[in-house]
Amino acid sequence: MQRTAIYPGSFDPVTNGHIDIITRASKIFDKVVVGVLENGAKHPAFTFQERVNMLKVAVAGIPNVDIKSFSGLLVDFVKQEDSSVIIKGMRAVSDFEYEFQMALLNRKLAPDIETIFLATSDKYCFLSSSIVRDIAKHGGSLEDLVPDELIETICEKLGKS
Amino acid sequence: MQRTAIYPGSFDPVTNGHIDIITRASKIFDKVVVGVLENGAKHPAFTFQERVNMLKVAVAGIPNVDIKSFSGLLVDFVKQEDSSVIIKGMRAVSDFEYEFQMALLNRKLAPDIETIFLATSDKYCFLSSSIVRDIAKHGGSLEDLVPDELIETICEKLGKS
Amino acid sequence: MQRTAIYPGSFDPVTNGHIDIITRASKIFDKVVVGVLENGAKHPAFTFQERVNMLKVAVAGIPNVDIKSFSGLLVDFVKQEDSSVIIKGMRAVSDFEYEFQMALLNRKLAPDIETIFLATSDKYCFLSSSIVRDIAKHGGSLEDLVPDELIETICEKLGKS
Amino acid sequence: MQRTAIYPGSFDPVTNGHIDIITRASKIFDKVVVGVLENGAKHPAFTFQERVNMLKVAVAGIPNVDIKSFSGLLVDFVKQEDSSVIIKGMRAVSDFEYEFQMALLNRKLAPDIETIFLATSDKYCFLSSSIVRDIAKHGGSLEDLVPDELIETICEKLGKS
Amino acid sequence: MQRTAIYPGSFDPVTNGHIDIITRASKIFDKVVVGVLENGAKHPAFTFQERVNMLKVAVAGIPNVDIKSFSGLLVDFVKQEDSSVIIKGMRAVSDFEYEFQMALLNRKLAPDIETIFLATSDKYCFLSSSIVRDIAKHGGSLEDLVPDELIETICEKLGKS
Amino acid sequence: MQRTAIYPGSFDPVTNGHIDIITRASKIFDKVVVGVLENGAKHPAFTFQERVNMLKVAVAGIPNVDIKSFSGLLVDFVKQEDSSVIIKGMRAVSDFEYEFQMALLNRKLAPDIETIFLATSDKYCFLSSSIVRDIAKHGGSLEDLVPDELIETICEKLGKS
């Protein structure tokens, strides 16, 4: 029996915290599908295609990870992928309550789908996409915050000129 | 001595979580006045009149509940209604800190007015107006989330066409 | 219709935070019954009788407050008093999660009984019985922490000799 | 590749909340090993053997669940079972912070072992072993709180006589 | 050795909670530099210059406090001021998690810079700039919420006309 | 003007998390006095003298740190040391609420004494004395958890024999 887990998000942009969760989930499940929410935020800093491309670069080395997009209810996307598991990263310093609420809601909408939480590595517990954008915008260093091969792309798009 | 309690909110739209609190408050107090905040959110999904009408439909069966509107400071509305009690629902998964802050602020503004909190039923602890809007927008089922008699109205206004 | 609310606790000893909640509850309800848990803690600092006596002194000025004892399930005591409302104080800095859990449990055990929470005054949000015991034990001042007329009693029992 | 997950605890006694997590985990993993901590609490209400026996009765209907005991570090037990996944239930009203701390600690002690969290069903979010013991001790009803076939055993051991 | 601490914020407008923290920090450090974030919020209620002027009025009586502006990364401003300490106020009812995340991030960006947190006085634990704006907009009293000498300025700009 | 800060605790035993806070505090203040609470816990794993000795070994390399003991109210010890600042470490995963309560209490007892909080390094956010004791008892590795020169001492006292 092949087990597929879905890891949803906006990834605007992907951070090392996301990659940490994807890597670890890829060891627990046979396949991990990263679901990029097409129109989550009103005005994403990166276009949908840029966000997908950055993720593809970042997970190139992990064989059992796919990058896909979705735009409706998460539970519909999970079913469509023949999966029954949603993965969420949780930071010690985090939106725990929000994620918990979403997990309960999703169980209500689709009782057969489980949300499982992984604790983000302590070294990434301060990290989020919005913090990465903020640092890039002010010309700070993104080293250790996003995958090395994406630093230039992100800084070019967001950095001071 | 007649005791009136005020239950304020935007109700954009009313959910079963709200109805749960209103029903329970109506058993503790002689009268419950639901105060609909006229201009709370910048861009409510439903007009003020729609939000009031939905509430009226939803509480039609509870004799000691009134629906009214207000637009200024909550404590001024409470005094105007000859009440001294504000009711707030609190979800296990919730904005507890925000509500607490508001309660302390309101005591500072009007020391004679009390805020009392009721614990939302566990089965509604994932529920909020914004979640209802989100599900309706993506064509998910609103059953058990809002009063049955409002499902069609909400889906028509917010659903995919 | 007379409305009675139950305010349960160990009161080992009663603090000004408790008195604050009792006073405010006495304005919302026709009668407030303070329920002293006879055998809550394993080794209370004060005997059951001492705790009751201190409470009686402390609320002597509030006409609609009674002091009673109970020893079983709280919901059984509430029913026995012909009440359907439990009052709990909640401190900004607090055991919110524990109290919430108890409220949900009590609704499960007795669906007709409501728990309502009052926000403890900001000036008492650091205060608890165990803190009072700790200060008394080390000879610190209890002024503003417990009712004036109890300071001597508490210090004599707990203070350094 | 067979995937085994470990669900550790004291189970003093097992509750419906535990059974909920075990059932759901048994659908995500090929095998779930419930690890009963032999000497976790100083003075458990039930002996180690009683706790194991109750679990065996409770999970008799789930084919891919085993009950085992352990007494040292959790990560050592996980390795010994050829597993790399620890399952923890998390209640909306919960010891989230403690569990998170344990997850980070266990990653430090054994980086290859993952802790994954499942959100406890909303209807069990008030439930814990200590609450069950408390209710049983005071003669309250355990219906819906523990598996039906254990109610008598638990009440006999803990109930008023 | 002179020790300078930086107290950053938007101060839109300054509240008595801010003044409380500034006053207390001025007793721990030789110099406190209040750093006004020039373009933090998208649409501040007060212009940058108004926010600076109000702060200058409010701290006029404290000799070792300077008001300055900054617009990039906070850690760059701290270095530029030859400081290595960031001061943050923390309310019992607060955005603790957010502040903690920022502190960890800033340590990552600049390991030699420390963030230290002071507990806001209990009497200000409900207070924030947005609450002050809200009250002023609805014609409520700002007494005890902002420095007396600023009440008129704030009400004129934000109040009902 | 010489500024002394007090860092109180039981240190049963000292961990790398404590040393991290002491080191950082020693850069902010002219002198740091580590105050070892003589009789905090009922049954400490290490005797008072052992706890003091371990601390002395651990901070030997930091010139402006003193190790002292105290047994009464913390604020009395702070005054006796001619200090007005208490240092507390705060973990992302932490007893924040408890520490906050203590800070407010101590301000009530001694308004001139400030409590300042430092955010514990992310890599120590899972660490506490009780976790160290637990690992040592079960023969786990203490590397990176306590100072290297104390590992043998701790394991000898607490480890399996």
Image (cartoon, coloured by chain):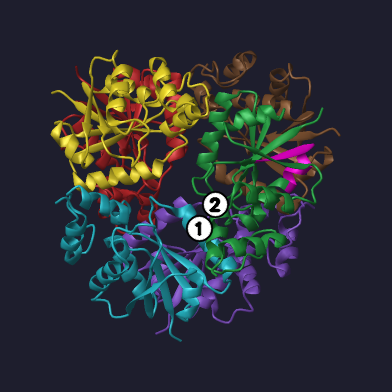
Chain colours: A brown, B purple, C cyan, D green, E red, F yellow
Residue at image point 63% right, 56% down: D124
Which residue in the rendered view is the most extreme toward the front?
F161
User: Which residue lies at the image location 28% right of the left edge and 46% below the top edge?
Assistant: F104
Mark 1 → mark 2, Cα distance in angstroms: 7 Å
Question: What is the quadrant of residue F148 in the picture?
Answer: top left
Q: Position of residue A41 (x, y in %)?
A: 63, 38
Q: Is residue A35 visible?
A: yes
**Nearer-the-camera pick, B160 or F36:** F36
Left or right relative to F1: residue E88:
right
Residue A98: where, in percent of width, then height? 58, 45
Which residue is most to the bottom? C1
Question: In the rendered image, which residue does mark 2 sit on?
Answer: D93
Q: Which residue is mark 1?
A: C100
Q: Amino acid at mark 1?
A: Phe
For the point 58% across and 53% down, which residue is it? D46
Q: State which chain disc 2 sits on.
A: D
**Magenta run includes residue D34:** yes
Q: Are marks 1 and 2 in contact (CB under 8 Å)?
A: yes
Q: Quadrant of the N terminus of chain F?
A: top left
Mark 2 element type: loop
Q: Residue A33 got which mark?
A: none
